[in-house]
Amino acid sequence: MKVQLIAITLLSVILGSAAYAGMYANSGTGMGVYGNRVAFSELDINGDSQVTESELEQFRTERMAARSELGRPMKNASNAPMFTTLDINNDGLLTEDEFTAHQMKQLNYRSDKRGSKRMLNKNF
């Protein structure tokens, strides 16, 4: 009887985990620091290898609407960087290099921030 109960419990946990993972497949949820990164090609709506401010705004609007429909509104959307912050050379166009530079800067900032928190945590 105990063996059956353990087997049923284990099977329930496995199936529940698989169902949970399936719900969030390809959604970026729970994928850690890198899971929700946007590719430059997603921003470059017209495919000309550069992004205008209107393309960036269109992408953000569509992404927020899509996530809202899924019941997953974007947290901190108001904290998104302004186009002028991303456009390093101020030519009104965002290149893939400028976009990548910004992403790397953000990753380094977040990594440093987490590292300092871990150093302060005596239980680490």
Image: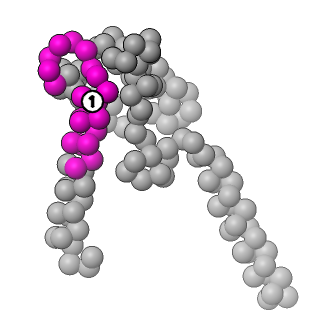
Q: Residue at x 69, y 54 (%)?
A: 19
Q: Is residue 25 above or below residue 93?
A: below
Q: Main secondary structure of the magenta part?
A: helix
**Looking at the picture, how far across and down is residue 49, in whole percent?**
37, 18
**The stretch drawn in magenta includes residue 94:** yes
Q: Is residue 65 above or below residue 71?
A: above
Q: Residue at x 42, y 32 (%)?
A: 39
Q: Is residue 10 left or right of residue 50?
A: right
SS category of the residue bearing label 1: helix
Q: 36 or 70: nearer the eye?
A: 36
Q: Which residue has dot 1 on it? A: 97
Q: Specify the quadrant of the image occupied by residue 38.
A: top left
Q: 111 or 76: nearer the eye?
A: 111
**Looking at the picture, how far across and down is residue 116, in whole percent?**
17, 63
Q: Specify the quadrant of the image occupied by residue 77.
A: top left
Q: Is residue 62 visible?
A: yes
Q: Residue at x 54, y 41 (%)?
A: 27
Q: Is residue 8 left or right of residue 103?
A: right
**Looking at the picture, how far across and down is residue 81, in whole percent?**
24, 29
**The stretch drawn in magenta includes residue 63:** no
Q: Quadrant of the N terminus?
A: bottom right
Q: Which stretch did the figure color magenta?
A: 88-108
Q: Specify the quadrant of the image occupied by residue 123.
A: bottom left
Q: Is residue 61 visible?
A: no
| Amino acid beneath label 1 | Asp
**Looking at the picture, how far across and down is residue 93, in whole percent?**
25, 15
